[in-house]
Image (cartoon, rainbow, N blue to C red):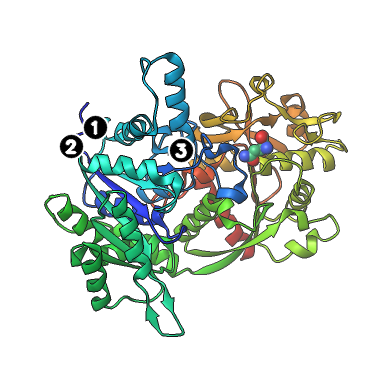
Amino acid sequence: MPDSKTKYIFVTGGVTSSLGKGIISASLAKLLQARGFSVTIQKLDPYINVDPGTLNPYEHGECFVTDDGAETDLDLGHYERFLDSKTSQANNVTTGRIYQHVINKEREGAYLGKTVQVIPHITDEIKRRIRILGKTGDYDFVITEIGGTVGDIESLPYIEAVRQLKWDPEVNCIVIHLTLVPYLSTSGELKTKPTQHSVKQLQESGVQADILVLRTEHSIPDDVKRKVALFCNISPDAVIESANAETIYEVPLLMQAEKLDQVVLKKLGMEINADPEINEWKAFLKRFKNPKRTVHIGLIGKYIELKDSYISIHESIIHAGAKGETEVKIDWIHSESLKEENVAEKLKNLDGILVAPGFGERGIEGKIAAVKYARENKVPFMGICLGMQCAVIEFGRNVLGLKDAHTTEINKDTKNPVIFLMEEQKTITDKGGTMRLGAYECRLSENSIAKRAYGKELITERHRHRFEFNNKYLKDYESNGMKATGVNPEGGMVEIVEVEDHPWFVGVQFHPEYSSTVLNPHPLFVEFVAATAKSKS
Ligand code: GLN
């Protein structure tokens, strides 16, 4: 299918990293979507890992998972949360994946004896990946965020691909360049030189930005904007200010006020129709900013030094809180700091406890201690993936009396492997992309918290794990009060456990946090937050 109907918008970054290209891309996408266009966002990551699945969260934060089982950059989570639509394998591409594809083709002999080079072979493959989404015919706009900072060696092939696409008569595209305008408090001035240099750097690679988005902590006066426009070959209306926002969800409104969407349409030669329709979004923000109550939820994890490691959980809690007009204060608690002896003291002020996903031994006993505290003290509890597995281990040890109950991920030789390696994982040796990944069905039991929350029997949720509940123990668990209330219809894997005689105790093997969006908060998070508010009152 040709992609002539699709317009491409590239988003590059200059001066520093962490300027929020992902949020600007998602905000622009939201505004275009609110004008009735279909939009998707893609992230190109210049690192050599084939995907971020093998990365430690301290490196790049959370690994997001799509329905079709791609392990991706966390920005895809923002895209889904803003647009309320799903991304897929095609929405995240790394240099590693590009090279892997080209090298495989070379081994197959597909280049017919040619020398395989960065230009044209790597750049052709980058361009192909960019246009895959346009060629589906599903989108009016494909926004492609280019990771890294202009000037990085790794980014060069991507910038070159953008340069080529800008000159391709078949492709209608523009470039938005995001930079930082720092404020020097000693002289009381906003400085535009880094922006000028960064735009020049882009020009050296043959790419002229069409729109500049200036990240700033202070409002930028018009004369400074005009100066930037003049020095950077940009029309004055296309210099957009992006001030710090109270919440990321305000950025679409800030960008609308700055007319980013209108400038984009104008640059692409499109008509500017009526204003975008974002009332539901505004209603969400209103609820978020005017809560009727406050609750405290403890998030127990081992990567809490880098909050991005749990970004989807954090955002899901925000969505659910706004839905219930509840301000949720998150207490970030390091699982390594929790011991049987101090857990009551450390968790005593919480209205809810969430034990996070994770891998490996570090901090696991702290997580198990937190589960025990939540179960015994009837504090609303949600366990996600490893958090659910910890709930199963705790129940085995302290209710069933299986003192050495454990997951074989940590204790291979335990006599009571209540969590163990899934059958299909047993022969796998490679680490990358080999977990149980992506969306699987789950059937919910009548009279369960889960069934009441979802309001239906068959659900689909995303997974990312190797280990699972050992069904050999299921009867014992159920007769003692921990029920499997969600089961995979094909394989019989336990996907949800709930504890009876407890106000709200739910452990899920899947990741509900990957599918909560601003306009569709996830029902389990909504009910969890509601339970915390109830237990407080
Ligand atoms: N380490 C566990 C497993 O592989 C849990 C994974 C997770 O929490 N995402 O099964």
Please, is residue 434 above or below residue 221 in the view?
above
Q: Which amino acid, mark 2? A: Lys
Q: Does residue 456 appear in the picture of this structure? A: no
Whether the residue under disc 1 has CB within 8 Å of ligand 1: no
The quadrant the C terminus occupies is bottom right
Answer with mark 3 or mark 1, whichever residue precedes in sequence: 3
- Mark 3 to mark 2 CA distance (whole Å): 26 Å
Give residue 5's mark.
Answer: 2
Q: Which is more N-terminal, label 2 or label 1? A: 2
Instruction: List the residue tagged with mark 3.
Output: 94
Tell whether label 2 touches label 1 (CB within 8 Å): yes
Q: Secondary structure at mark 2?
A: loop
Amino acid, disc 1: Gly
| Most foreground residue, 82 or 134 | 134
Give the amino acid at mark 3. Thr
In screen coordinates, is 403 left or right of 131?
Answer: right
Query: Residue at coordinates 44% horizontally, 14% vertically from top-left?
Result: 108
